[in-house]
Image (tube, rainbow, N blue to C red):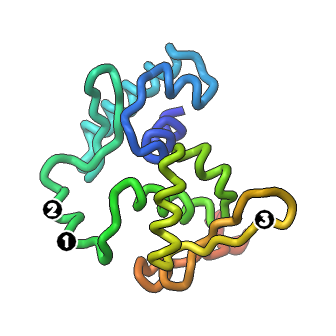
Amino acid sequence: MPATIEATLYLKGKPLTITEISEILNEPKESIEQALFALMAEYSQRDTALEIKEKDNKYGLQLRQGLGELVQNLLPVDISGASLRTLATIALKKRILQSDLVELRGSGAYEHIKELVAMNFVERKRQREGRSFWLTLSEKFHQTFTVIPDIKVPENKKAA
């Protein structure tokens, strides 16, 4: 469960209460609380760029203090953090319906999508059946962020 909590905090991109996480994951609050505290302890022991912070009974996944300037220097484009998280969600899913993305990221995703389409990082095509749009990554995204596509590992190599 810690991995699903971590993914939820990352994809939502904003601090959430234990109740909110519980409702999103459809798990009991007690289980969420235990897994969240275990995840926080794990993050505190790791030498990683990310941390989970609590403020006003809300928990958020964020960069550790002092790394913000590094990120600004490394980002190849001028893109907001929220739009970047929306872009990362699309990248993780490879292809996602706009309606599903809005459900994951919230109504602010509509603005993020407009921004990402305008920057040519995302392509938007109308769904054949239905009213939503399919969102996929553009060639410009792959050139800018140099993402290596999934490599299929032959079955006999997996066992090694």
Amino acid type of the residue tagged 2 in the rendering: Glu
Precedes in sequence: disc 1 or disc 3: 1
Query: Residue pushed farthest top?
Result: 30
Q: Residues within 10 Å of mark 2 (few under 14, many from 20)?
A: few
Where residue 25 appears, as percent x and y from the top left, is: 60, 30
Circle 1 residue? 73
Labelled pair 1, 2 in contact (Cβ < 8 Å):
yes
Amino acid type of the residue tagged 1 in the rendering: Asn
Q: Residue at x 74, y 68 (%)?
A: 126
Circle 2 residue? 69
Q: Specify the quadrant of the image occupied by residue 97.
A: bottom right
Q: Residue at x 21, y 47 (%)?
A: 64
Classify mark 2: helix, strand or loop: helix
Q: Specify the quadrant of the image occupied by residue 130.
A: bottom right
Say which of 70 and 47 sits in front: 70
Give the CA separation, mark 1 to mark 3: 37 Å
